[in-house]
Image: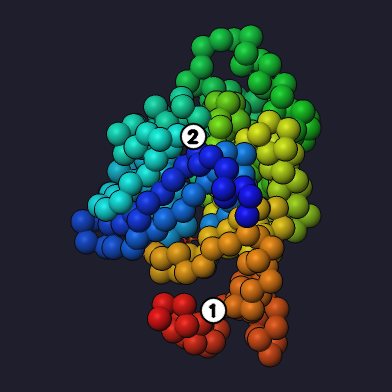
């Protein structure tokens, strides 16, 4: 995959993450995010997707988690040496799972909180207009309290807020969660436009493999804290195990990786 060969923006090398000093959750995860790519981390509940994103944005401490082995580099610098706010300033921003808009603030006030690392009012106003260009729905709803907006609008607001810090790379946790299929496509289309027009890099964690593989260029499959497979979206989408367990195709009509066949797959992947 040519994207993977270009210069790496993020490099995760064999990280282990432990919560509460005892719970080993990531067991040597490595991945590369090239500049300008859309990379997906796929996997079921509890595979370690969120933990991987939190490790990259240095947000584990608040969860009583720590990276105990390996390293994470952003443009050649160790992220473990940088605080979360410093990372935002340098262009790494995370959109949390579950959206986390401030319910009592309007959409516009929420967006403006994303510019907290910046001072130039003119630039902030220009950035707000740029966000509204990508998310016309947010412009329509700019004066509405976030609490009274739909799930899709809140997801857009969370992404828009992240864009207000002018990021180079956005870590997106489960952008499709709780959204109707049409809205999922709308959100992913915007991600694609941002990637194409602004060269914003995305690392997204998704359980919805079919939509993620449609928009990402490259994917990593995480199972029980380990990367069990990686490849271009095309290669993954054509892989029999991925089709059967993540895309719900084939496999004599079984619909989910969670069914009984997962034992066989685990044996094959973890052997
Ligand atoms: P989901 O889609 O369900 O969020 P995930 O792939 O993002 O799944 P993580 O949230 O990273 O997975 O969780 C990986 C494992 O770590 C799970 O077993 C989870 O119970 C555990 N875990 C996550 N956060 C904590 C925490 N703060 N303290 C202890 N264990 C945690």
Q: Please give left or right for residue 20 compared with residue 197 in the image.
A: left
Q: Which residue is mark 1?
A: 258
Residue at 71% x, 24% y is: 130
Q: Position of residue 228 (x, y in %)?
A: 47, 69
Q: Position of residue 253 (x, y in %)?
A: 70, 87
Task: For ligand 1, tell me if the residue under mark 1 lies within 8 Å.
Answer: no
Mark before the other along the chain sequence, 1 or 2: 2
Image quarter of the C terminus: bottom left
Asked which secondary structure carries label 2, the reply is: strand
* Ligand number 1: quarter of image: bottom left
On the question of residue 223 being in view, the answer is: yes
Above or below 11: residue 220: below
Residue at 55% x, 84% y is: 259
Above or below 164: residue 6: below
Q: Position of residue 80 (x, y in %)?
A: 31, 39
Q: Please give left or right for residue 81 compared with residue 127 in the image.
A: left
Q: Please give left or right for residue 49 compared with residue 210 in the image.
A: left
Q: Which mark is residue 92?
A: 2
Q: Position of residue 159 (x, y in %)?
A: 61, 38
Q: How are the residues colored?
A: rainbow
On the question of residue 17 being in view, the answer is: no
Q: How many marks?
A: 2
Q: Which mark is residue 183?
A: none
């Amino acid at each position: 995959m040519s994207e993977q060969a270009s210069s790496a923006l993020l490099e995760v090398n064999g990280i282990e993450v432990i919560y509460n000093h005892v719970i080993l959750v990531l067991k040597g995860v490595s991945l590369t995010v090239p500049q300008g790519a859309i990379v997906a981390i796929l996997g079921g509940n509890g595979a370690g997707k969120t933990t991987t994103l939190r490790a990259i944005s240095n947000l584990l401490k608040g969860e009583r988690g720590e990276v105990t082995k390996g390293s994470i580099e952003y443009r050649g610098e160790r992220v473990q040496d940088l605080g979360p706010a410093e990372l935002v300033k340098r262009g790494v921003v995370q959109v949390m799972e579950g959206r986390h808009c401030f319910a009592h603030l309007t959409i516009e006030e929420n967006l403006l909180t994303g510019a907290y690392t910046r001072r130039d009012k003119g630039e902030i106003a220009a950035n707000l207009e740029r966000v509204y260009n990508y998310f016309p729905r947010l412009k329509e709803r700019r004066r509405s309290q976030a609490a009274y907006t739909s799930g899709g609008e809140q997801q857009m607001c969370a992404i828009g807020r992240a864009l207000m810090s002018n990021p180079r790379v956005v870590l997106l946790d489960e952008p499709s969660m709780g959204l109707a299929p049409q809205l999922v496509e709308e959100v992913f289309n915007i991600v694609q436009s941002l990637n194409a027009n602004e060269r914003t890099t995305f690392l997204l964690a998704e359980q919805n493999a079919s939509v993620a593989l449609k928009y990402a260029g490259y994917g990593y499959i995480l199972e029980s804290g380990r990367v069990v497979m990686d490849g271009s979206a095309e290669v993954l989408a054509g892989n029999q195990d991925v089709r059967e367990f993540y895309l719900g195709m084939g496999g004599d009509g079984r619909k989910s990786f969670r069914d009984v066949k997962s034992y066989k797959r685990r044996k094959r992947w973890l052997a």
